[in-house]
Image: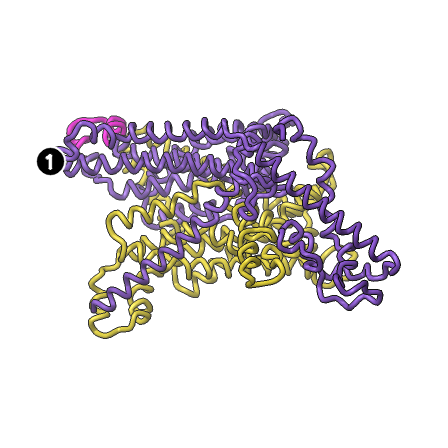
Chain colours: A purple, B yellow
């Protein structure tokens, strides 16, 4: 028995470890790439610690304008979908079982329908309606903002409804009955009994709907028409070229999330402790300092302060020296390669250049060219058919290297490299 | 038929009366109007209009409502048999894309199930107190990060110069960088990741209701662990699995962002075809027809599977 339990615990630990590794690994990697100065998001090779990508992110006007649009859409969606979800949940509690399952199926389908379909149907429907009413193209029927709110509310309301339904299941109907018996009007009973009971559900529904609206891509990409929300701007940025400013954005979002989660955790713990009476009994909690420190506002404030400190420190960090150093290193490398290549060309002039065909045999040469280890003469050359005019024994394959794309490519950044860095370069 | 109609009407009136008595006229009006607006204006009518629109020719705005605006099957015919130049054979390309999308969505669902079932079980029955709370928190936290950024993270991880290739090359596991994006590994991983939450919580909710003593009893009577799961845990988890699998399948078949960002150059998702008809080709009716096809096929597939596994659609979302 104990062996089985031990095995079970081992299994549980391994499963959780693997699973959460899968869940958090990509995020951790992305966060690390935000601080690497390499212009493609990567961890290896590590170049310099930098905070420049955050300023690149802030300078992206399209994203920032999208952020404003998204905030407006989010507010509209929350304002509509929370009441709709509440109404749906209330209707479901009151009607008979047969009608209920039909209504439930109808209201839950927007979650299952592909977002693409929802987006298209919303656009087509309002467009046709506007046209049949003779509205012109400036009216709201053809407005991306309005269409996006309409399209998102369709399915986001269902999330709100699920939250309200879960809460309503725990509602004791006799409370309302008692209020009615005591002479309250039905409206009073609703406002004074049911709504206060639903208050936590309203809060979490508002939060979840805001998040869902903000995140949504599939529906929004159709309904926003020619405009941009934060998420659609982000998606086009990811599709058409990546740089680590996206990782920087992830760092910001993850930071906000962590602060929010920890504050919320502090809040629930404190409330639990208050409910079980541990605050009054325990001497640990009785200490005023501990009480202050475990207060959610204090926790949140402390974390925000730490984040602000990190931002301030980061804004003062100047990585230009290191970046210039890396560039210099690359340039030196290229010069050396160039020199070697010239040398080889000079050595090989008597033998006419026949083996240019060997070049495509090594597709990875370009990627490896930056790694110092592969730069030894012949390191890049594959075991290609021996060139008929192989030069002298000391470096049998050097001639072939001269035609490798990898050896030539690094030249590209050379002329441009020193220019942007020139004002920042320290005196040697 | 008419008996059922009047029966449900009577039920509706009864419900209204009960509602009025309990919550008052204002609330009853609000609920009635809101549910009507949501169900009819936001859900049913747009779908019907889209369905109608998919039977229309692609006309310029001026010609709409004119004599040319007649119903046609041309877009559905195009999906099945291709354009007029294709010689009458089946439209292998588009049908193939749809089939590939469905197969890939099923694969993602199965991978997700294999990944999430153990975790949901551990969460419900092995973890307790702080560990369980941390696990729930750890499950939710990654999903506050934008979907696009999560896909981007997988591109950083799986790219030709990404971390996995970097490790593999430096450890000498493989010689050439492997193109995970072309092999669709990145896409499968990204989609699996995107919908983990939708699979874990329904299974967790279902398994949590299981009495732990039943597992103990089965163990005491000498059942092997797989037998315990097969005979005791799985039957309880079935509604949760059905709910989670349905959502993961529908969402991954309807995904657009992840295929756009992580998909290889040779693989196309059906939603990308729809997007192309709308945005690049400007043929909205055909895009609507393709959307109708996607929705019908996916819902039909789900309903069929629910019949096979004897689960009701009411279990979804619970």
Q: Quadrant of residue A18?
A: bottom left
Tell me: A16 left or right of A385. Answer: left
Q: Secondary structure at mark 1?
A: helix
Residue at the far left in the pictured view: A281
Locate residue A340 relative to residue B129 in the image: left or right: right
Image coordinates for residue A160, horizontal then vertical, percent: 38, 39
A112 or A308, which lies in front?
A308
Q: Is residue A381 above or below residue A217?
A: below
Compare residues A386 and A367 and report the one nearer the observer: A386
Q: Answer whether residue A179 is magenta in the image.
A: yes
The structure residue drawn at horizontal position 33% and vertical position 60%, both measured from the top left corner, is B237
Residue at image point 78% right, 68% down: A386
Chain of the residue under label 1: A
Q: x, y percentage for residue A316?
A: 49, 27
Q: Residue at x 50, y 27 (%)?
A: A315
Residue A158 found in image quarter: top left
Compared to residue A223, the image places residue B270 above or below, namely below
> Callout 1: few (<14), some (14-19), or many (20+) C-alpha neighbours within 10 Å?
few
Relative horizontal placement of residue A22, taking residue B297 as reference (left or right): left
Query: In the rendered image, which residue does mark 1 sit on?
Result: A281
Residue A355: x and y in percent read: 82, 62
Give the residues in magenta.
Answer: A177-193
Instruction: Answer above or below: position of B172 versus B40.
Output: below
Residue at image x 70%, y 41%? Answer: B282
Q: Please say whether residue B292 is visible from this viewpoint.
A: no
* Residue A417 visible somewhere in the drawing: yes
Secondary structure mostly seen in magenta is helix
Q: Position of residue A256 (x, y in %)?
A: 41, 34
A95 vs B250, nearest the viewer: B250
- In reply to whether residue A233 is colored magenta, the answer given is no
């Amino acid at each position: 028995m104990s062996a089985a339990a031990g095995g079970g615990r081992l299994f549980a630990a391994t499963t959780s470890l693997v699973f959460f590794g899968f869940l958090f690994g990509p995020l951790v990697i992305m966060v690390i790439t935000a601080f690497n100065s390499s212009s493609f998001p990567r961890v290896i090779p590590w170049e310099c610690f930098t905070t420049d990508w955050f300023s690149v992110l802030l300078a992206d006007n399209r994203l920032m304008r999208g952020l404003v649009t998204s905030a407006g859409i989010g507010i509209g969606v929350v304002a509509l979908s929370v009441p709709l979800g509440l109404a749906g949940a209330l209707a479901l509690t009151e009607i008979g079982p047969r009608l209920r399952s039909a209504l439930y199926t109808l209201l839950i389908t927007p979650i299952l329908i592909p977002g693409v379909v929802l987006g298209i149907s919303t656009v087509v429907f309002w467009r046709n309606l506007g046209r049949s009413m003779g509205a012109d193209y400036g009216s709201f029927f053809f407005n991306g903002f309005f269409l996006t709110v309409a399209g998102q509310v369709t399915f986001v309301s269902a999330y709100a409804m699920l939250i309200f339904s879960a809460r309503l299941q725990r509602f004791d109907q006799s409370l309302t009955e008692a209020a009615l018996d005591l002479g309250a009007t039905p409206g009073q009973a609703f406002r004074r009994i049911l709504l206060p009971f639903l208050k936590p559900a309203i809060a979490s529904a508002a939060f979840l709907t805001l998040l869902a609206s903000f995140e949504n891509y599939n529906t929004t990409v159709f309904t926003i028409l020619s405009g941009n929300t934060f998420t659609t701007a982000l998606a086009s940025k990811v599709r058409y070229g990546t740089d680590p400013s996206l990782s920087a954005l992830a760092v910001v979002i993850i930071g906000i999330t962590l602060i929010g989660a920890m504050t919320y955790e502090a809040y629930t713990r404190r409330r639990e402790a208050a409910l079980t009476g541990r605050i009054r009994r325990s001497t640990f909690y009785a200490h005023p300092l501990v009480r202050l420190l475990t207060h959610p506002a204090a926790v949140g404030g402390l974390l925000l302060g730490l984040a602000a400190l990190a931002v301030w420190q980061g804004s003062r960090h100047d990585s230009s020296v290191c970046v210039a150093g890396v560039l210099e290193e690359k340039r030196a490398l290229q010069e050396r390669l160039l020199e070697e290549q010239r040398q080889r060309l000079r050595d090989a002039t008597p033998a006419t250049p026949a083996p240019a065909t060997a070049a495509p045999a090594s597709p990875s040469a370009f990627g490896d060219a930056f790694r110092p280890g592969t730069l030894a003469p012949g390191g890049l050359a594959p075991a290609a058919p021996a060139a008929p005019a192989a030069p002298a024994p000391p470096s049998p394959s050097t001639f072939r290297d001269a035609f490798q794309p990898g050896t030539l490519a690094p030249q590209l950044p050379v002329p441009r490299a020193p220019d942007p860095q020139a004002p920042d370069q320290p005196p040697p | 038929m008419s008996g059922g109609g009047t029966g449900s009407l009577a039920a509706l009136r009864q419900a209204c009366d009960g509602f009025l008595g309990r919550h008052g006229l204002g609330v009853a009006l609000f609920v009635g109007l809101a549910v009507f607006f949501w169900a009819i204006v936001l859900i049913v009518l747009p779908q019907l209009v889209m369905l109608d629109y998919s039977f229309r020719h692609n006309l310029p705005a001026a010609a709409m409502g004119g004599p040319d605006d007649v119903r046609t099957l041309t877009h559905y015919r195009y999906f099945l048999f291709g354009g007029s130049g294709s010689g009458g054979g089946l439209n292998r390309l588009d049908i193939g894309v749809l089939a590939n999308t469905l197969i890939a969505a099923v694969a993602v669902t199965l991978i997700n199930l294999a990944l999430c079932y153990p975790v949901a079980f551990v969460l419900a029955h092995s973890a307790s107190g702080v560990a369980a709370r941390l696990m729930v928190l750890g499950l939710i936290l990654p999903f506050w990060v934008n979907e696009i950024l999560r896909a981007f993270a997988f591109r950083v991880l799986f790219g030709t110069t990404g971390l996995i290739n970097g490790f593999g090359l430096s450890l000498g596991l493989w010689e050439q960088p492997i193109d995970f994006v072309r092999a669709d590994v990145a896409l499968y991983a990204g989609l699996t990741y995107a919908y983990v939450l939708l699979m874990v919580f329904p299974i967790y909710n279902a398994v949590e209701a299981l009495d732990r003593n039943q597992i103990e009893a089965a163990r005491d009577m000498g059942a092997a662990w797989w037998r315990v799961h097969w005979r005791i845990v799985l039957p309880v988890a079935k509604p949760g699995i059905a709910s989670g699998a349905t959502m993961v399948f529908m969402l991954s078949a309807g995904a657009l962002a992840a295929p756009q960002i992580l998909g290889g150059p040779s693989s196309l998702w059906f939603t990308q075809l729809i997007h192309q008809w709308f945005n690049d080709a400007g043929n909205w009716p055909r895009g609507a027809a393709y959307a109708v096809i996607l929705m019908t096929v996916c819902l039909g597939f789900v309903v069929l599977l629910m019949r096979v596994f004897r689960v009701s659609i009411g279990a979804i979302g619970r």
